């Protein structure tokens, strides 16, 4: 099918002063005419020479523009019959404005890649990240990677990085493992996904702490596993309750080091009871070690995966808290008997993330920077937490220190979710406590106040905003006003 070329349908406006190259200007004009249907399929474009003369440009410029359109399958060369518009133009991307697809994690994150606000959880101190050093290591890694012979990378992660992590875990978490038990991931969530796939536990039940990181509950549900909430008290998970509620669960997903969100460390008796249950029932313990040894007071308890019974523990680590969630790096330590299975699942369905980030992290660990950074973060966060505690005591009661946050309970009946939603308008981002409960209506309302980004210069202002937020909520519950 042919259609005549109608110059009236294509308005070229070549601008030699514009930063867009002339070739791209010609391509853009023709592309728009084709995609919008002004140039019908089969239309023969003018020859290079004719269009070049018409536009006052070189013949090669028009040729390059036509080649670019051919690369996009918008036109094709018909030999002596010239260049013609292709039969079916590529579909246009749907305009973002026209449909509203809800973004993920609506209730947990106020948006993505935003500058963190005071009290916001999950983001380490922005002012203390060794950005220059990281940029240097990253640049070197990109160069090394670009120069290296290209073959498929190890889906479990770069061998040298896995060796470094194994050495690091021995020092910081008391874990003794072979590097091939370690599989690199893009963080905790990816580690959980890999674990569920490798264990093949779809359709089974899993203990989850109550309260717990909402991602854990929802992650299990999405992964086809039924979460069974098991209460947490001052000694950590109530293992006796777990046994009563779901003795035959396939696994228990726990944060034994510093329970999220209460900060409680699982007591030695409960550790023993949990490991005994797993051994007896041939169940798995999935240890979310999100803070690693980043414990502000004293030394972190050794990981569950470090001692007797470790053969039933899958240890999930993340560099999100210790370094930055922006790196997107974490790892799983599989029990020895499952190491091959985890490797296989990584190989087929869940390969390790970007090699250059891995190489940069390898150098970061090898240079001793990681341990130095951890030491620095511990004292910095302790200072910030204590300063917040002292400052808050004037008008808000702190009920618990929990990991890198402090928890302030609100009187029952307060809508902490509505408060947290409103908070960014006051320039702060505390998290609501109740959503960590399996049944939010049962949970004590409160605010989780992360201390990592509370620089001394902003402490007063952030606390004033917090007091104003709580006052507003007390005067007239925000949920009532919204209704
Ligand atoms: C309990 C818990 N586990 C894990 C993570 C880390 O998740 P990721 O590595 O996906 O950033 C967090 C982060 O906030 C957390 O609170």
Image (cartoon, grey):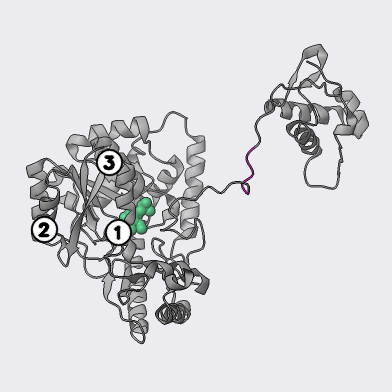
Does residue 115 appear left or right of residue 77 in this picture?
A: left
Residue 210 x/y as whole percent: 23, 59
Answer above or below: position of 137 versus 38: below
- For the residues labelled 2 and 3, the Cα–Cα distance comes to 23 Å
Secondary structure at numbered mark 2: helix
**Disc 2 crowd, CA 10 A, few/some/many (<14, 14-19, 20+):** some
Answer above or below: position of 192 versus 455: above
Mark positioned earlier in the residue sequence (3 or 1): 3
Residue 94 x/y as whole percent: 62, 40
Of residues 468 and 279, the one nearer the viewer is 468
Mark positioned earlier in the residue sequence (2 or 3): 3
The residue at the far bottom in this view is 394
Of residues 343 and 9, the one nearer the viewer is 9
What residue would you read off at disc 3? 195
Of residues 285 and 135, the one nearer the viewer is 285
Residue at the (33%, 38%) spot, across then down? 159
Does residue 447 appear left or right of residue 200 in this picture?
A: right
Residue 43 x/y as whole percent: 81, 22
User: Which is closer to the viewer, label 2 or label 1?
Assistant: 2
> Does the magenta segment cover residue 105?
no
On the question of residue 319 being in view, the answer is no
**Disc 3 crowd, CA 10 A, few/some/many (<14, 14-19, 20+):** many
Q: Are marks 2 and 1 in contact (CB under 8 Å)?
A: no
Q: Kindly report the secondary structure that dominates the magenta region of the rendered protein.
A: loop
What residue would you read off at disc 1? 291
* Residue stretch rendered in magenta on the structure: 93-97
Secondary structure at numbered mark 1: loop
- For the residues labelled 3 and 1, the Cα–Cα distance comes to 19 Å
Does residue 226 appear left or right of residue 458 in this picture?
A: left
What residue would you read off at disc 2? 270
Does residue 260 appear left or right of residue 450 in this picture?
A: left
Quarter-of-image position of residue 84: top right
């Amino acid at each position: 099918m042919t259609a005549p070329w109608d110059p009236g349908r294509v308005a070229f406006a070549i601008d030699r002063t514009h930063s867009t190259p002339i070739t791209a200007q010609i391509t853009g004009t023709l592309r728009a005419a084709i995609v919008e249907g002004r140039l019908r399929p089969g239309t023969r474009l003018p020859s290079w020479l004719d269009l070049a003369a018409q536009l006052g440009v070189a013949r090669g410029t028009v040729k390059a523009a036509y080649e670019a359109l051919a690369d996009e399958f918008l036109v094709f060369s018909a030999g002596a019959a010239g260049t013609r518009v292709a039969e079916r133009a590529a579909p246009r991307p749907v305009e973002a404005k026209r449909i509203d697809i809800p973004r993920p994690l609506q209730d947990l994150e106020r948006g993505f890649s935003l500058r963190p606000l005071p009290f916001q959880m999950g983001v380490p101190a922005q002012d203390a990240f060794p950005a220059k050093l990281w940029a240097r290591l990253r640049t070197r890694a990109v160069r090394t990677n670009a120069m290296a012979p290209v073959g498929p990378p190890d889906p479990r992660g770069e061998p040298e990085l896995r060796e470094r992590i194994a050495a690091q875990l021995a020092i910081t978490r008391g874990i003794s493992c072979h590097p091939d038990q370690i599989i690199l991931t893009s963080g905790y969530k990816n580690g959980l996904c890999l674990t569920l796939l490798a264990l093949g536990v779809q359709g089974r039940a899993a203990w989850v702490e109550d309260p717990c990181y909402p991602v854990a509950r929802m992650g299990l549900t999405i992964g086809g596993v039924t979460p069974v909430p098991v209460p947490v008290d001052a000694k950590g998970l109530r293992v006796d309750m777990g046994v009563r509620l779901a003795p035959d669960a396939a696994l228990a997903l726990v944060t034994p080091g510093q329970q999220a969100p209460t900060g409680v460390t699982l007591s030695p008796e409960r550790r023993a009871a949990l490991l005994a249950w797993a051994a007896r029932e041939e169940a798995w313990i999935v240890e979310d070690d999100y803070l690693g040894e980043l414990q502000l007071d004293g030394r972190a308890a050794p990981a569950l995966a470090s001692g007797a019974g470790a053969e039933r523990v899958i240890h999930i680590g993340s560099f999100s808290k210790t370094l930055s969630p922006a790196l997107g790096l974490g790892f799983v330590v599989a029990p020895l008997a499952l190491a091959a299975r985890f490797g296989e699942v990584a190989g087929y369905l869940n390969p390790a993330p970007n090699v250059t980030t891995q190489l940069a992290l390898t150098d970061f660990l090898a240079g001793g920077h990681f341990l130095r950074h951890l030491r620095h973060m511990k004292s910095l966060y302790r200072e910030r937490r204590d300063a917040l505690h002292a400052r808050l005591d004037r008008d808000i009661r702190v009920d618990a220190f929990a990991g890198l946050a402090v928890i302030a309970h609100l009187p029952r009946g307060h809508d902490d979710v509505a408060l947290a939603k409103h908070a960014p308008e006051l320039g702060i981002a505390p998290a609501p406590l109740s959503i960590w409960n399996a049944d939010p209506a049962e949970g004590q309302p409160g605010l989780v106040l992360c201390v990592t980004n509370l620089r001394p210069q902003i402490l007063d202002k952030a606390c004033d905003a917090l007091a104003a937020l709580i006052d507003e909520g007390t005067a007239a519950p925000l949920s009532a006003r919204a209704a």
